[in-house]
Amino acid sequence: MQILVTGGLGYIGSHTCVELLNEGNDVIVVDNLSNSKIEAMDRIYQITNRKIKFYKEDILDKNALRNIFNENSIDSVIHFAGVKAVGESVENPLKYYENNVFGTVNLCEVMNEYNVKSIVFSSSATVYGIPDEVPIVESADCRPMNPYGRTKRMVEEILEDLFNADKSWNIKILRYFNPIGAHSSGLIGEDPNDIPNNLMPYITQVAIGKRNELNVFGDDYDTYDGTGVRDYIHVVDLAKGHVNAVKNKLSAGYYIYNLGTGIPYSVFDVINNFKKANNLEIPFKIVERRAGDIASYYGNPKKAFDELGWKAEKNLEDMCRDAWNWQKKNPKGY
């Protein structure tokens, strides 16, 4: 198959390109490089010995998208392109609505013009907001708490409306939890532009000496060790979930899947597994809770196993080992 991957040089996108190429697909990437690095393209080639076709364009440019569809025989789209920092979305919501919502509408309009009606959308578990119960299932109410989560939920609803208007579409929504880790080669991984928003890159930057210590935001939550509990998933497992979604021959429809391990891990679990996997100490201090953080947030991934045949295979120690392997081989990122 010929697959268009929007945002394909980003953290999750680059790992997905590797898995798509390993499965024998032809991969076309469109990425504006606003939150990714062109070096990832060469790293993908080093891992797979196969080239991707790359367009440095923005999905807000509809004519650029038309050119891509004109020049290729695209079978399906995996849509990652968008902005993704929760804090920034609160400070600059219009940027998030423009990129995430308008960009997706542009993409779907051009797909419609070229009769390409298969899309896998990179959504997020943030669409659930504060859950009524855990583990979270796909039928749970969605009450996103910030502009980033609301843009993801809006796109889901737009795609559902699109399917209801035209039942020939095949739309799969993948809501994922907390991706961490890196490819085992250490050639591609998470390379945040600024201070990391997420726990694992913060830990690896402390380990490499880039930061003095890790801040643990609260140790008085109603959890088994007092720290926040999350569903961490290895990025390679997540990438394979996208491959399963795009190649799955489910009939036309609108489908939603959680992608996670379903296993709750605390902040201390992650720190301790990192220390064990890599024989390193991670200095940390307990600081005040962050506004909006909740005690426990993890999903039930059973539906993805039942319908897509997908299940996360890597454990927390694998995630910690591979994240550190990436960081020590790339101390300054790409």
Image (tube, rainbow, N blue to C red):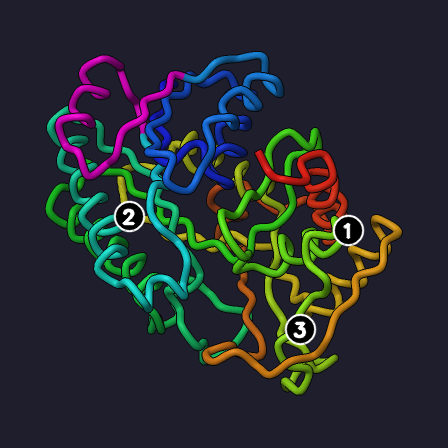
Q: Quadrant of residue 222?
A: bottom right
Going 57% across and 81% down the picture, which residue do you hit?
289
Residue furthest out toward the right: 279
Q: Which mark is residue 317?
A: 1
Task: Label 3: state its secondary structure.
Answer: strand
Q: Position of residue 254 (x, y in %)?
A: 28, 48
Residue occupied by mark 3: 216
Which of the two labelled residues, at mark 1 and mark 3, occupies the earlier sequence position? 3
Q: Are marks 1 and 3 in contact (CB under 8 Å)?
A: no
Q: In the image, what residue type sits under mark 1? A: Glu
Q: Residues within 10 Å of mark 1 (few under 14, many from 20)?
A: many
Task: Label 2: state its secondary structure.
Answer: strand
Q: Is 73 within the magenta?
A: yes
Decide: is 111 above or below 67.
Answer: below
Q: In the image, what residue type sits under mark 2? A: Tyr
Numbered disc in front, either 2 or 3: 3
Compute the Cα span from label 1 to label 3: 20 Å
Q: Which mark is residue 254?
A: 2
Q: Is 132 within the magenta?
A: no
Compute the Cα span from label 2 to label 3: 39 Å
Decide: is 180 above or below 168.
Answer: below
Q: Position of residue 180 (x, y in %)?
A: 61, 50
Task: Give the residues in magenta.
Answer: 53-76
Q: Is residue 283 left or right of residue 73?
A: right
Going 73% across and 50% down the picture, which residue do you hit?
320
Q: Which mark is residue 16?
A: none
